[in-house]
Amino acid sequence: MKEIVPTSPPMVRNQFESIRELYSRHVLPTYARFDIAFTRGEGSHLWDVNGRRYLDLGGGIAVCALGHAHPELSATIAEQSGKLWHVSNLYYQEPQGRLAARLVSHLAPGRVFFCNSGAEANEGLFKLARRFGHEEGRFEILTAQHSFHGRTLAGIAATGQEKVKMGFEPATPGFRHIPFNDLKAAREALSPATVAILLEGIQGEGGITPATPEYLLGLRQLCDEHNLLLLMDAVQCGHFRSGRFQSFQRILENAEGAQGFLPDAVSMAKALGGGFPMGAFWVQEQHAGLLGPGSHGTTFGGAPLGASVALKIIEIIERDRLEDHIRNLGDWFKAELQKLIDAHPKCLTGVRGLGFMLGLELAGDIPAFAGRDGTPSIQMTNRLHAEGLLVIPSGARVIRFLPAFNLVRAQAEEGLSLLRKVVGSLG
Ligand SMILES: *Cc1c(COP(=O)(O)O)cnc(C)c1O
């Protein structure tokens, strides 16, 4: 007679399921999350609850400037946390002042305001523009189609994508969208109420599209002619990601007539704090008086804990010459992606971007994806996850590479070989 052996209980409880259960019961379902839960990281690698290792080429969506658990940043935050975490912006403290000076030294004479996120940094730009046009009754800000400027009410009004606005009407007034990289359209869109033009130097959420040199220079001229502010959202493309401090510096470096090009204000966040929540905006010195005492404020912005980390990140980037590293390795990686495109023209249709902000465009009709759930970018991302590679989808047809600035060549090669394997399996 056959003996019936009861199945043994699992050796370990399924930690992923129990974490997911916490989310499904208690966290607002605003994200369609991937089925991975991470527990630790080191440099450009992450480990999930099952001990599985991933190569992280997404960098927490362009945030983890020096990767995960960087020992010098851990030491900095530990040291500062033993001294001073927070004082109100009613008082002075050294890290904020030094960080502001460092940002100014990389950009141009001007002033910095610190906040906690990209959306908040952009809010600062909107308020700056409203102040600038206030006496003349001008308030309208032109932004680009396919842009992304954050999830606050003004941020979604500024964002040139319908999907972020849906159901949140009425929209905050004073924003209109124009086609990106189309100077004529910008000129024709001006109205007597227009006060500013806001754009990303490289559109991130819109699919990694750099502005052309002609567009940037033309917008600067248009703004000068009509007394408009030229505002740049560098939340994703800034902070050395392009291989220069600002993407416009990289885009314009060989352009004729670009000497002295400067926007009136620049918003920053993401890589600024390397994972410590932090945002900022810089304004040209001539506009510093627009936001005087009492005009703007923040409880947490620029507090010593975050400011000391951000300062250390910049010091390391300078010391280790990571700007050059990003350019060289980024250019090489982009060329390798182009080779992959040439080998698989039916699956891959293009590569765009600069430095460590690259987008690989997928065909809309990859046969292996047909009849399955999810856009090509989501299906591709899932297949890469299965091989242990993290990338970030951008729109329906682009996957983004936004790695840590200290990614090394061997890791870039590891990423490429995983990508080749997955692309090769698509037939
Ligand atoms: C991520 C992002 C934002 C919003 O930043 P949050 O920190 O999420 O508020 C704004 N603009 C751009 C270009 C971004 O990529």
Image: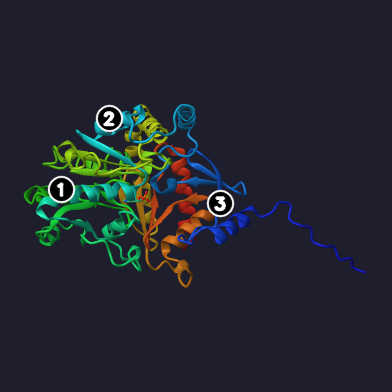
Residue that mark 1 sits on: 132
* Residue 213 visible in the displayed image: no
Three-letter code, disc 2: Ala
Three-letter code, disc 1: Phe
In this rendered view, identify the residue nearer to me: 265 or 202: 265
- Helix, strand or loop status at disc 1: helix
Q: Position of residue 225 (x, y in %)?
A: 6, 50
The label number, if any, that marks residue 101 in the structure image: 2
Cα separation between marks 3 and 1: 46 Å
Q: Are marks 2 and 3 in contact (CB under 8 Å)?
A: no
Q: Is residue 422 above or below residue 259?
A: below
Cα separation between marks 2 and 1: 24 Å
Left or right, 114 with respect to 181, comes to: right
In this rendered view, identify the residue nearer to me: 18 or 217: 18
Left or right, 7 with respect to 282, comes to: right
Specify which label sits upstream in the sequence, 3 or 1: 3
- Helix, strand or loop status at disc 2: helix
Residue that mark 3 sits on: 37
Q: Are marks 2 and 1 in contact (CB under 8 Å)?
A: no
- Helix, strand or loop status at disc 3: loop
Residue reaching furthest to the left: 225
Three-letter code, disc 3: Ala
Specify which label sits upstream in the sequence, 2 or 1: 2
